[in-house]
């Protein structure tokens, strides 16, 4: 979640005179992240850590009941798809073989000081040593991507430890999406992604693209390293919290004649644990035997090739041409949201190395106009490009382009050519819509209901009326609290209210004046004190800001609040 301070007077006059620590929350794409004071709340590895500790994978729903509305074959596809994320084909070559070369190459590039005397590092190290299954899981997930990432760090002369950063950011889950709106292996928020040229569309999200996101992340880290005079720990801290945050902390220590290294700075809580996590992981990978861990073998060879497709391509057809499962195509190309590559590009696919030549040869024999299926559609009364595109999982822009239309105007009886999936929707089990379907189908506590978003709705309103939290409502629907609620979007809500109702005419919903604001923690503040001051719930504050309620707040810490300004001080 990104927070940018603005003068209090720019907020609302109704708040003047009461709260000197309030600032507006904004998501700015124009400001350089090198200078920002934004803390990126990444998906992290907490979900995987929890599943390792409990033996249950909360993400995969592997052992949890699915909604009865889902067809049996889709249930199987859902489980198999997620299994392939955690258990890629490139597994242990031979349990009796010697350590694979990839780890030797990784260790050769280590640069950070692994011997730093820090309680924070030791705490992380102790957990990893107690949970060797966690290391196995992240290696299995990351085996598709690690060779490419190590190559790229070496090209830039960056520490090889940076290749392990996706473990901290996303646990090597390419579909990871945080409640702070960060996506992909490297967890870019929209504004930072846009700054580094990572585009988002209905078809495609560059933040999840293995090639472009890795390039952007390492470019960002390289620039931060230069900004902080070659100090890699400060660069890492700035990757998480913004260069401005780190510079402010350094300036504060300088004025107090205190050291200005990472370990001496007062930084946001997430950032204080961010660098220790990476160093602890590097220590494990540097000498696994010392911690009773045996790394799965991983060959020092490319897992995938990049193949030029020359245009849009159905992903099911791509899988058939390459001779691989379609889920393998999605896991190597997680940026594609739908059933095909984006019509606007990039016109390339990542394909397993051993299948790449087969794919190239087979693709060359398929004419460009046969690489997606086409449907001949006759326009009916009430149709528009919007309704037709939604019906066939495409976009109005694509229909305009392929039918050489000059405007959105269409007439009854007109014939349109529509690109469509070659297989049924269940085949594309890792598409965005199917991932969301599984997430919404997961059984949870409460009364399940479906709600269609209306103009003026907010997560805060919906959560309050159903005695739950903003973070829960957004997570149930594959969203983040900062994502816009578009009228017409259907949400799944697990209500804690005995008789769920939504926005009745007499409710206070319509009268609420909820605003997203920021709050700077002051000396003596506690979650309860802040909650009372702004008439919100402690649990909500914790969920909005990914806080552990058992930990103390730190003066200067940034919080995001969703406040009804009529009740604000």
Image (spheres, rainbow, N blue to C red):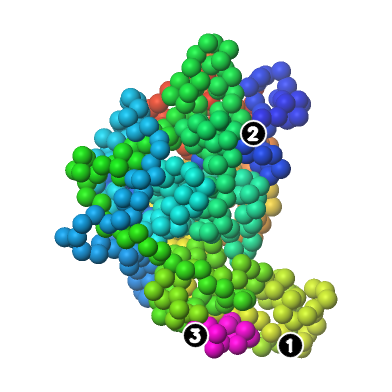
In terms of image quadrants, where is residue 297? Answer: bottom left
Q: CA distance from mark 1 to mark 3?
A: 32 Å
Find the residue positioned furthest to the left: 96
In percent of width and height, residue 460 lies at 58, 42
In percent of width and height, residue 363 lies at 53, 83
Q: Nearer the viewer, mark 3 or mark 2?
A: 3
Residue at 53% across, 72% down: 307
Circle 1 residue: 415
Circle 2 residue: 35
Q: Secondary structure at mark 2?
A: loop
In percent of width and height, residue 519 lies at 60, 27
- Would residue 545 be seen by someone viewing this image from the given angle? no
Instruction: Please give left or right for residue 96 compared with residue 55 in the image.
Output: left
Instruction: Please give left or right for residue 50 compared with residue 38 in the image.
Output: left
Instruction: Please give left or right for residue 509 compared with residue 147 in the image.
Output: right
Q: CA distance from mark 1 to mark 2?
A: 53 Å
Q: Which residues are magenta?
A: 361-374
Residues packed near mark 2 inside 10 Å, few (<14), some (14 to 19) or many (20 plus): some
Residues packed near mark 1 inside 10 Å, few (<14), some (14 to 19) or many (20 plus): some
Circle 3 residue: 362
Q: In what quadrant of the picture does the C terminus appear?
A: top right
Q: Nearer the viewer, mark 1 or mark 3?
A: 3
């Amino acid at each position: 979640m990104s927070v940018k301070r603005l003068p209090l007077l720019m907020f609302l006059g109704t708040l003047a005179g009461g709260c000197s620590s309030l600032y507006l929350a904004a998501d700015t794409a124009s400001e350089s992240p090198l200078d920002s004071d934004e803390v990126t709340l990444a998906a992290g590895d907490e979900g995987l850590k929890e599943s390792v500790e409990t033996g249950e994978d909360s993400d995969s729903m592997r052992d949890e009941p699915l909604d009865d509305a889902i067809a049996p074959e889709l249930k199987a596809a859902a489980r198999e798809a997620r299994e392939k994320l955690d258990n890629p084909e490139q597994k242990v070559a031979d349990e009796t073989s010697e350590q694979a070369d990839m780890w030797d190459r990784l260790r050769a590039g280590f640069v950070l000081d692994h011997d730093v005397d820090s309680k924070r590092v030791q705490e992380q190290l102790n957990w990893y040593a107690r949970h060797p299954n966690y290391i196995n899981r992240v290696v299995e997930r990351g085996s598709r991507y690690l060779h490419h990432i190590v190559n790229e760090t070496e090209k830039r002369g960056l520490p090889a430890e940076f290749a392990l950063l996706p473990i901290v950011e996303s646990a090597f889950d390419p579909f990871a999406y945080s409640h702070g709106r960060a996506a992909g292996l490297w967890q870019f928020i929209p504004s930072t992604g846009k700054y580094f040229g990572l585009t988002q569309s209905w078809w495609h999200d560059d933040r999840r693209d293995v090639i472009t996101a890795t390039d952007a992340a390492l470019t960002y880290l390289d620039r931060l390293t230069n900004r902080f005079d070659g100090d890699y720990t400060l660069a890492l801290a700035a990757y998480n919290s913004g260069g401005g945050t780190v510079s402010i902390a350094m300036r504060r220590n300088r004025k107090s004649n205190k050291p200005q290294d990472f370990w001496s700075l007062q930084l946001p809580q997430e950032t204080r644990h961010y660098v220790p996590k990476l160093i602890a992981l590097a220590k494990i990978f540097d000498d696994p035997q010392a911690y009773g861990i045996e790394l799965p073998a991983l060959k020092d060879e490319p897992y995938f090739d990049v193949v030029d497709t020359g245009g849009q391509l159905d992903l099911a057809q791509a899988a058939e041409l390459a001779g691989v499962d379609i889920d393998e195509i999605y896991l190597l190309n997680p940026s594609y949201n739908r059933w095909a590559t984006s019509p606007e590009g990039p016109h390339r696919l990542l394909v397993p190395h051993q299948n790449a030549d087969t794919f190239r040869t087979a693709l060359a024999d398929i004419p460009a106009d046969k690489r997606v299926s086409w449907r001949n559609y006759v326009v009916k009364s009430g149709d528009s490009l919007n309704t037709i595109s939604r019906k066939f999982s495409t976009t109005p822009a694509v229909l305009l382009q392929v039918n050489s239309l000059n405007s959105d105007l269409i007439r009854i009886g007109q014939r349109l050519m529509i690109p469509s999936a070659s297989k049924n929707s269940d085949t594309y089990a890792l598409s965005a819509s199917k991932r969301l379907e599984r997430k919404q189908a997961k059984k949870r506590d409460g009364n399940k209901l479906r709600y269609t978003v209306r103009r003026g709705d907010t997560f805060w309103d919906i959560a309050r009326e159903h005695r739950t939290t903003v973070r829960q409502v957004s997570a149930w629907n594959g969203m983040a609290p900062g994502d816009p609620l578009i009228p017409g979007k259907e949400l799944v809500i697990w209500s804690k209210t005995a008789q769920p109702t939504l926005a009745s005419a007499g409710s206070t919903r319509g009268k609420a004046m909820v605003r997203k604001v920021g709050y700077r923690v002051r000396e003596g503040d506690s979650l309860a004190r802040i909650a009372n001051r702004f008439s919100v719930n402690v649990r909500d504050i914790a969920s909005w800001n990914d806080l552990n309620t058992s930990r103390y707040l730190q003066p200067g810490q940034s919080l995001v609040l969703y406040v009804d300004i009529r009740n604000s001080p």
